[in-house]
Amino acid sequence: MHQLHILYIEEGYKGIDRKSTGPYNTNMKSYTFRGGVHPPERKELSNTCSITNIVPSSHIVVIPITQGGAPNKPLVSPGDTVVKGQKIAESDTYMSVPVHASVSGTVKKIEPRLIAGNTEAPCVIIEADGSDTVQTMDVLDPFACTRQEALTRIRSAGIVGMGGAAFPAHVKLNPPPEKKIDYVLVNAAECEPYLTVDERILAEETAKVIDGLAIVMHITNAPEGLICLEDNKKYLIPTIEKAIAASGKEHIAIRLCRTKYPQGGEKMLIKAAVGREVPSGGLPADAGCVVHNAGTLCAVSEAFREGKALTERALTISGMGCQSPCNIRVPIGTIIADLIPEVFQISEDTKKIISGGPMMGIAMMNTQFPVAKNTSGVLFLTEKETELTDESPCIGCGRCIDVCPCRLPPVLMMRALKADELQNAVKIGLMDCIECGACSYICPARVKLVQRFRVGKMQERTELQRQKLAAARAAEAAKGGN
């Protein structure tokens, strides 16, 4: 079984021979990091499909009131009339970002609904009225306004990291004063199999990506900008170079990285692109870097140039269980089920539905969940594409150590957790695990390593929170005694 698995890896590593759109430096050096795996790419299913704008025929959107950062509170009530771009949820907390209506219409309900991750969360349900009414902000020159005005605009537009983490963009762009930013990296690696939406954004909206990069470089005072993409997308180099030249912006270059998973992880991208390492427990700013997804930079450009809030999301629909793979742009809050069968069709042999990519995405119980700001794709996988075998005992082969991009010993962390030695697992490096799944993918025994690590990290965070609460209560008691 494992031998067949390895052959599958090698087959996938060959990738796709895409045709160039013009002459470029075929000798451009490609960079990489230690470790990683080569799962089958499967990008040929959708990488030539242009992004199509879609509005669900149901005319209903279900918008989670919190989509990154601290929890929000609704600003509207059932029965209210809202317009596209209007704030419908917000918080005063710095680590939060507001959420906007993605269609114009009437608020029907505010209630818990299923979201990605198979949990329920408060959502605003809006029925669209079919009008084209849009509320925008005033156009703002990003190179003439103050830094604080620029950060406020990005927050007001509700922009979060669109690569998956949904971290508030204004927070990432405002590191402590002592953290000097030397590089802004455009994460266009898109290393997850099947997903091609970033590739299409880079091909179709290149100028916006370059403009967003220049804006972020200005805000962070970074002297260099690097557009990082894997070499399976090097056919885009002429398009990118042309857009850079047209922008008139200097100190922006392309950094080609080898096609390998998880090349798109922030720590891996920084290591490959600029040769720096993010310290344990640290952030990219600790290595003098800011990393933003290509889609996020498009949203930044639109927030300034057009006054648009983040109300739409481009994503990939793919998998062998999908009869019509595509890249689409839909209003945030669009229910996946409402796109079937009008936009795409799924086959009866679909065995798994995943929100995100197959390596780090979440398996969903059904299609009744909405597209959120960080929904990069939805996959419909057949039994042939999924790993449904039961795990067997670890044989101690050490292959998980060889492929771990964070240079951790997954087998030792797993053994510590299995022995109920949480603190030992933490000392070994549990909290530095990025949950990329490379270890689980390569494991011949199919041990569910990432699931164990997620549970262990949750236990550690719970324990730290308990200790913090106990310390606060002790401090209050001591204060009362005085």
Image (cartoon, grey):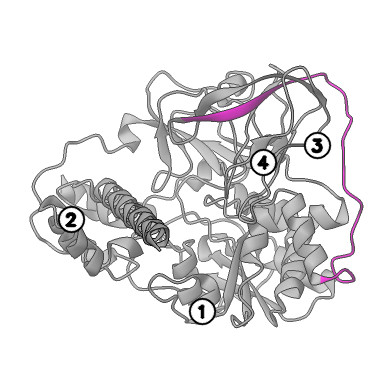
Residue 381 position, x and y percent, is 40, 32
Mark nearer the viewer, 3 or 1: 3
Element type at mark 1: helix
Front residue (pair 176, 414): 176
> Label 2: which residue?
414
Residue 86 badge: 3
> Label 4: which residue?
313
> Label 1: which residue?
287
Q: In which image quadrant can residue 336 be found?
A: top right
Element type at mark 3: loop
Q: Residue at x 72, y 81 (%)?
A: 251
Q: Residue at x 81, y 33 (%)?
A: 84
Precedes in sequence: disc 1 or disc 4:
1
Q: CA distance from mark 3 to mark 1?
A: 37 Å
Mark nearer the viewer, 3 or 2: 3
Precedes in sequence: disc 3 or disc 2:
3
